[in-house]
Amino acid sequence: MKNIFLAGALLVCQFSWAQYTDINIVKEVKVKNKGVVVSAHPLASEAGAKILKMGGNAYDAVIATQYALAVVYPQAGNIGGGGFLVGVKNTGEKFTIDYRETAPAKASRDMYLDKKGKANTDWSQNGRLAVGIPGSVAGFFATLKYGKLPMEKLIQPAIDLAEKGFAITEQEANLLNVHQEIFQKHNASTSMAFVKNTSWKAGDILVQKELASTLKLIQQSGAKGFYEGKTADLLVSEMKKGNGIITLDDLKKYKVAERKALEFDYKDNHIVSMPLPSSGGLLLAQMLKMSGYENLEKYQQNSAQAVQIMIEAERRAFADRAEYMGDPDFIEDKTTYLISDEYLRNRWKSFNFDNATPSSEVGKITPQPKESTETTHISVIDKDGNAAAVTTTLNGLYGSKVVVSGAGFFLNNEMDDFSIKPGVPNMFGAVGGEANSIQPHKRMLSSMTPTILLKNGKPYMVVGTPGGTTIPTSVYQSIVNVVDFKQNANTSVNAPKFHHQWLPETVMAEGNFPATTISELTGKGYVFEKVRQLGRTEMILIDDNGNIHAVADGRGDDSVAVE
């Protein structure tokens, strides 16, 4: 028997639902002629697989998985945030859906500057002023036209999880306990169990009645059940409790953007990724093309030579991110030029194996905004060969830390992904210039990199990860591990990773990264910093015999489910 915590009114009682308390984490599967779902939480993966078993396709499954993550993975899964979807249908059709958050109409370039003109990052990272207009629910409905089943069925697994409850894992319990103080600071009037309980432990059952009611409104009224009516009123009421600026008109006018996928070739692979306002696809193209000039396959994975090449490709790409990248509806989109062979070969001329290239030599030094590492990724392929790669986020852990009272969901803090003052780093150290400055209705720049690789016109790899600015570099390394270093999916996903983003000069490396490589590169002028982990990659890889290898990252509670 487990303790049950009821979000909306705190309740402890003795009860158990075996369906949601016996959590089975599956890290790797190999199947054929079946659909698979890989996500950050086993119950969310199972929700997607359940939809596949009901006759849904990959796009149905990815909707169901995202709704379920909003319930079971509240630190990043969401209906109060936004994301990107990259899809490749079995007909060869490619599409992307941009449901990134947008700045409210009352947003302004200097809204996070104090009276002395100094950037106040607490305003952009915590509380109601940090919230961008949520895009997730609109994105789910935009995805629906590519699916087969009605939304009423796709949202039902999430409603069941919220209403009946589920057992939280040890990682989830620890995160909730660590964040209690800041939850209480920003949610003084709520009775949510997220906020009121201070002693979570693995196996506790979390019931979320308010969130279940919100999901039912969406089930009954469609997107209007979120962007208008009761839920919209509750969200705007929440804004008025502090200094939030989102209005009912902002919510009603939110629109997704369907954009042309960013496509390019790398060796025998055709890569389909997300265009601006995601910097991820553009960075990925730049990094793969530049390192391709050095024939990475000649070296061993994570050898000093291979890592140096890749660090320098990352350095040059991120310098361009700071200067050129933003919402394409507000800036001149220079993607074609930035990934051209002419531009990149010239960019690469300063590379040499003798020493590190100073960052000041490859870009105009302007500080970059940081970007939260607490994103979440889903990779799906169905038995018919339709593929979806989806990355969504609240930005920071639990977003702005604000729960919409009466509606039961966390709101994002995506406004911090703008350059809150050109030259000032955001929460993840990324620097931004004028291209990513705040303007009303503008989408903030992102690093999310949902990506699908094709071979002979068919999906061959579906990959993505959370990790803020480390996302593009982790996806980059995952692809190189498979394509150049001939690793299998499991080895590629769980291999130790590194990250460099131009500024700061430091190279981050996971704790188990090869010491000999670090030592050799330190002698060439590189500075390394050890970190606990970089990303949580979800990969599906299809071999030449049609076998599907699906791998969930070993760094978390991530899990694979099969239809």
Image: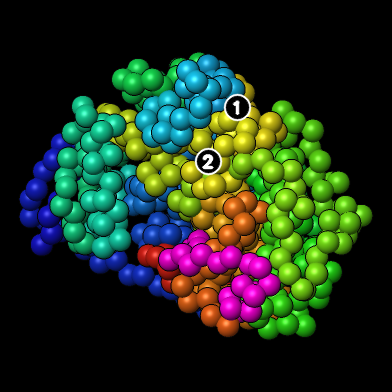
Residue drawn at x 18%, y 54% is 200
The disc labelled 2 sits on which kind of residue? Asn
CA neighbours of label 2 inside 10 A, class few (<14), some (14 to 19), many (20+): many
Residue drawn at x 41%, y 40% is 399
| Front residue of this view, candidates 494 and 124 | 124
Q: Position of residue 127 (x, y in %)?
A: 37, 30
What count of labels does the image hold? 2
| Front residue of this view, candidates 444 and 427 | 427
49 is higher (above) or lower (below) than 5: below
Dot 2 falls on a residue whose secondary structure is: loop
Q: Position of residue 358 (x, y in %)?
A: 72, 58
The circle drawn on residue 438 is 1
Quadrant placement of the N terminus: bottom left
| Front residue of this view, candidates 512 and 562 | 512
Sequence-wise, the earlier of marks 1 and 2 is 2
Residue drawn at x 61%, y 72% is 522
Residue drawn at x 69%, y 59% is 314
Asked which quadrant contains residue 289, the reply is bottom right
CA neighbours of label 1 inside 10 A, class few (<14), some (14 to 19), many (20+): many
* Magenta segment includes 523: yes
Q: Is residue 449 visible?
A: no
Residue receiving disc 2 = 426
Whole-angstrom CA distance, mark 1 to mark 2, is: 13 Å
| Front residue of this view, candidates 354 and 146 | 354
Q: Position of residue 364 (x, y in %)?
A: 74, 43
Circles 1 and 2, Cβ within 8 Å, touching? The answer is no
Q: Position of residue 355 (x, y in %)?
A: 73, 69
207 is higher (above) or lower (below) than 16: above
Dot 1 falls on a residue whose secondary structure is: loop
- Residue 325 in the figure: left or right of residue 488: right
Q: Which residues are magenta?
A: 517-537
The disc labelled 1 sits on which kind of residue? Ile
